[in-house]
Image (cartoon, grey):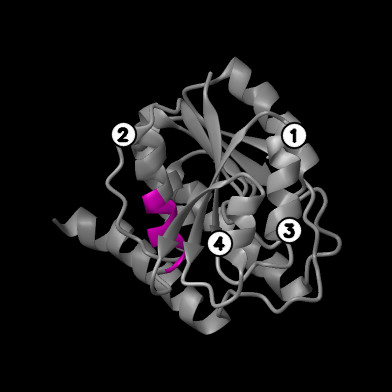
Amino acid sequence: MRICVIIPAHNEARFIGPLITGIKQKGIDVVVIDDGSTDHTGSLAQAAGAHVMQNLRRSGKGASLQKGFDYALKNNYDGVITMDGDGQHAVEDLEFFLKVIQASPQSIVTGDRSRTNKHMPLVRRLTNQFMSGLISLICRQDIPDTQCGFRYISSSILKQMKLECHDFEIETEVLVQASKKGFKVHSVSVQTIYRDEASKINPLRDTVRFFSYIFKEVVVKKIR
């Protein structure tokens, strides 16, 4: 089974090299989408052995992931694992994903930080719990951590999706579309490494985008 790890990255020169090296040591291909970085993210990723794709301008996490998904499908990968480029996701947790993937290859597997989130900032923890509860209702299945970017998606599922979101709300869009098509979403407990770096999430902007997507998905499409 051929799997690649897709990493959207914007100005992650500090972390990208060691992250890729750790993944490559497990024999997994790595695809990095350099999202308009102004540092050496792209060149360091390439030096570490990743296939690097460039966005000349910053296009957003969703647009970068879609570019990576297209690459994986064109190159006949059986599935993708997405990870963030800021070092928050632990390479050793890939083993938990691989075990579930072997048992359920045609599925989605999301990381679940709810059991290891004692270091997560309180506001983020409460927001994540609320969003996860809401999305679980919409998806009609229990997904304990809908906002975790560490996840596996089967290529057979990706082929059936029509993704439109260009930023962080794509993580919700993937779960909603997959659930509507009847796919099971599994979860594995993962750790999250919080660093002193400022979060790339804009609380106001990204919350507005999240609820705009939910409104369009739940209200507008039902009216149609």
Q: Residues within 10 Å of mark 2 (few under 14, many from 20)?
A: few
Name the residue carrying label 2.
159
Q: CA distance from mark 4 to mark 2?
A: 27 Å
Q: Earlier in the sequence, mark 3 or mark 4?
A: 4
Q: Which residues are magenta?
A: 60-67
Q: Position of residue 6 (x, y in %)?
A: 53, 46
Q: CA distance from mark 2 to mark 1?
A: 29 Å
Is residue 152 left or right of 121 when viewed as pictured? left
Q: Secondary structure at mark 2?
A: loop
Circles 4, 1 touching at the beta carbon (< 8 Å): no
Name the residue carrying label 1.
25
Q: Is residue 214 visible?
A: yes
Q: Secondary structure at mark 1?
A: loop
Name the residue carrying label 4.
42
Q: Earlier in the sequence, mark 1 or mark 3?
A: 1
Q: Nearer the viewer, mark 3 or mark 4?
A: 4
Name which residue type carries label 4.
Gly
Circles 2, 1 touching at the beta carbon (< 8 Å): no
Q: Quadrant of residue 132?
A: bottom right
Q: CA distance from mark 1 to mark 3?
A: 16 Å
Q: Nearer the viewer, mark 3 or mark 2?
A: 3
Q: CA distance from mark 4 to mark 1?
A: 20 Å
Q: Earlier in the sequence, mark 4 or mark 2?
A: 4
Name which residue type carries label 2.
Lys
Q: Position of residue 155 (x, y in %)?
A: 41, 30
Residue closer to the observer: 166 or 40 = 40
